[in-house]
Image (cartoon, helix red, strand yellow):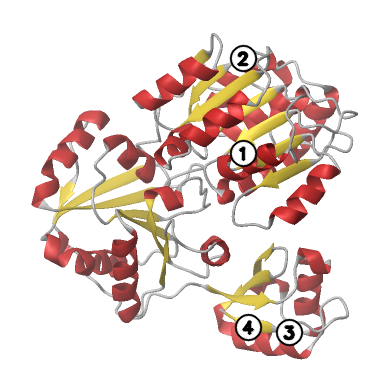
Amino acid sequence: MSTLPFSSLPLSAAMQANLEALGYRETTPIQALGLPVILQGRDLIAQAKTGSGKTAAFGIGLLEGLNPRFFGCQALVLCPTRELADQVAKELRRLARAADNIKILTLCGGMPLGPQIGSLEHGAHIVVGTPGRVLEHLRRASLVLDGLRTLVLDEADRMLDMGFIEAIEEVVSLAPAKRQTLLFSATYPDGIGRLASRFLRDPQRVEVESRHDDQQIEQRFYEIDPRQRFEAVAHLLMHVRPQSCIAFCQTRQQCQELVAHLQSLRISAQSLHGEMEQRDRDQVLTLFANRSLCVLVATDVAARGLDIAGLEAVINVELSRDAEVHIHRVGRSGRAGEKGLALSLVAPAEASRASAIEALQQAPLNWQRLDELVVKNREPLLPPMATLCISGGRKDKVRPGDILGALTGEAGIPGTQVGKIAIFDFQAFVAVDRSIARQALQRLAEGRIKGRIFKVRLL
């Protein structure tokens, strides 16, 4: 089975109408396999990666079972990172548009406890959060799971990698024994099997066979001298000149050193690693998503859960020690029917890792020579957009339309030169065409947004 029409599934008329309005007519393979099981109320183990449509699979299922009149937590979704939790909550809100007054709340670390406690006092049908912060609220009794119907463990393999097993165990111990449990994981290491045997009851296991569309992703492997690794990355970037690329590193230190090297060559690059402050992570991810940053240099754990549309290339600065992780990295490129490119640097000491990837893919690797790549354009590698940071956000009642109106109205900037707008609690980001960034900055700084003056700076 590859896909099904949503109309063939036993969904409410309101959900069917909303899916039609969202343009969801055919299921993805994981939805076709998983949704019938979820709608039957059975436990599920699904091997599926970010970008497969898994959020809609469990989202549709848990929304169909909600009682809108009961404002207790009926569904809990645990995610490894705040970014993934935010993405999941956003998708659930889109799916819940047709339902009456469904409240969805995120509970993640790095954010103040007080406002979260206040929101919980008003009730929430669905809670999406990271294990540590959810557990903190459970211990404080600000979150109660007496009415829980469905527990979702999303990206379960990475939650284990990040050391969340004890927190997950305690959360599960505080949930009702009579519940539905859905476990989603991109890979299926031994730890996931042990987790499933303890927390799930007679689960149905489904797996989407193709990890990614091999025909859509061109993989190239280059043997390098490990002492020239950073120079090799720069050479690849200047040859390909991607506007959107993730370069995967093994450690935080390697990330920071590579970024310093690339920036010295006037290549637009910033790092993303697990030890960053949440505010800095938000800013870097916003820049990358809105095309104000060309190269995101990241560790696997820090990049987990990100679903960046239109990613042109992936560079493996060093081969992963786990062949499954390599497949997951590569699968970030070439999504939604687009062509993808994955470039891997391999030092002699990493030959066994390359062999493991070859065995897993069941196809010979495409080896090429780095010294044969010609760099025709030596101009700096800069992104097409630039981002303005505004000192007002959701708490100031600032909405995307207010910012767009200020730019295209009073400031006189054409709407075609304004990109993505992201609103956070106390600040907002707007992407504009790089060629008019200074002009937009001056106009916004001198004008008003929603009748008020805010500080504006260019990132």
Q: CA distance from mark 1 to mark 2?
A: 28 Å
Q: Residue 233: x and y, percent?
A: 26, 64
Q: Of the residues tagged 4 and 3, which is closer to the observer?
A: 4
Q: If you read the primary sequence from the N terminus, does the residue marked by circle 3 or circle 1 appear first?
A: 1
Q: Are marks 4 and 1 in contact (CB under 8 Å)?
A: no
The kind of residue tagged 4 is Arg
Q: Are marks 4 and 3 in contact (CB under 8 Å)?
A: no
The kind of residue tagged 2 is Val
Give the residue displayed 15% in from the left and 36% down from the top: 355
**Relative vertical location of residue 202 with respect to residue 5 in this rendering, above or below:** above
Give the residue displayed 61% in from the left and 45% down from the top: 133
Q: If you read the primary sequence from the N terminus, does the residue marked by circle 4 or circle 3 appear first?
A: 3
* Marking on residue 457: 4
Q: CA distance from mark 4 to mark 2?
A: 50 Å
Q: Of the residues tagged 1 and 2, which is closer to the observer?
A: 1
* Marking on residue 135: 1
Label 4: few (<14), some or many (≥20) within 10 Å?
A: some
